[in-house]
Image (tube, rainbow, N blue to C red):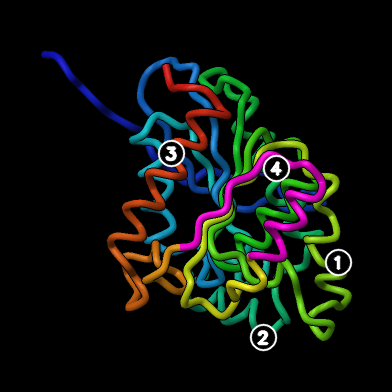
Amino acid sequence: MTGYQGLIAETVVIRGHEGTRIPAYTARPLGPGPHPGVVVIHHRHGFDWASQETVRRFASEGYATIMPNLHHRYAPGAGAGAAAEAVQAAGGVTDDECLGDVAGALEEVRSQAYCSGMVGVIGYCSGGRQAYLAAAKLPFDATVVCYGGRIVPPEEDINERTPVAPIALTADIAGPVLNLSGAEDRRPSPEETAQVEAELKRLGKVHRVVVYPDAGHAFFGVDRDLYRPEAARLGWAEVLAWFERYLGGAA
């Protein structure tokens, strides 16, 4: 038989912020690799089936992929919807919690024998903001931001839970950044996306910004009314080309 393809997907437990044990969903191609790695940061709706399907999609493309459940500590054992509500009631995941959990996921995937050691991060919606933050704070080799709101936050969004504007940390980003958004989005608005692009350019960061004209927020979301198939198709092509270029091909 030729052309065989297979992958393995499962929920594992990793150590996140301050050593807290949290679930993470993982998927990877069968075979020894080495495979480049991807850390997926889920949207504000949480650790749901659509986000897990994204993890499996990356595995089918040849990546050792992991997604930490950033909402777990707020509602242990609850479903994605209930956990997301608990997070919203608490005022959102703190930046410290996010960075600790994402650092744990990065360590987990990079430590595996089947991982090449080259690992990127991608985030959607609130996860887009968090991916930009992680790019500045953690040793990722490439970053993708998908409609990340509040990278350029209003003053009232700066508080003890999210104490910094991610755009202010742009100088600390080491790896290349791909930023995808829709022209019809309002958070981030096209003007905010342009601000991020200008700052990346001013600081000499390797970057690419793509704004899709007939799409708004969450255009990748196949389970949402905001899904835009053409923008999603083109966006996936951009993401995969970016990771192929900066993380290396799969074995």
Query: Which label sits on residue 240?
Result: 3
Name the amino acid, label 4. Gly
Q: CA distance from mark 1 to mark 4?
A: 21 Å
Which residue matches tag 1?
A: 164
Instruction: Select label 3 or label 1 by which is in front.
Output: 3
Q: Position of residue 66 (x, y in %)?
A: 53, 42
Q: CA distance from mark 2 to mark 3?
A: 35 Å
Is residue 72 highlighted in magenta? no
Above-or-below relation of 48 to 29: below
Which span of residues is magenta-colored?
A: 194-211
Which residue matches tag 4?
A: 104
Query: Which label sits on residue 89?
Result: 2
Residue drawn at x 56%, y 49% is 122
Instruction: Select label 2 or label 3 by which is in front.
Output: 3
Do residues under tags 4 and 2 come within 8 Å of each other at their CB atoms?
A: no
- Is residue 79 visible in the rendered structure shown here? no
Name the amino acid, label 1. Val
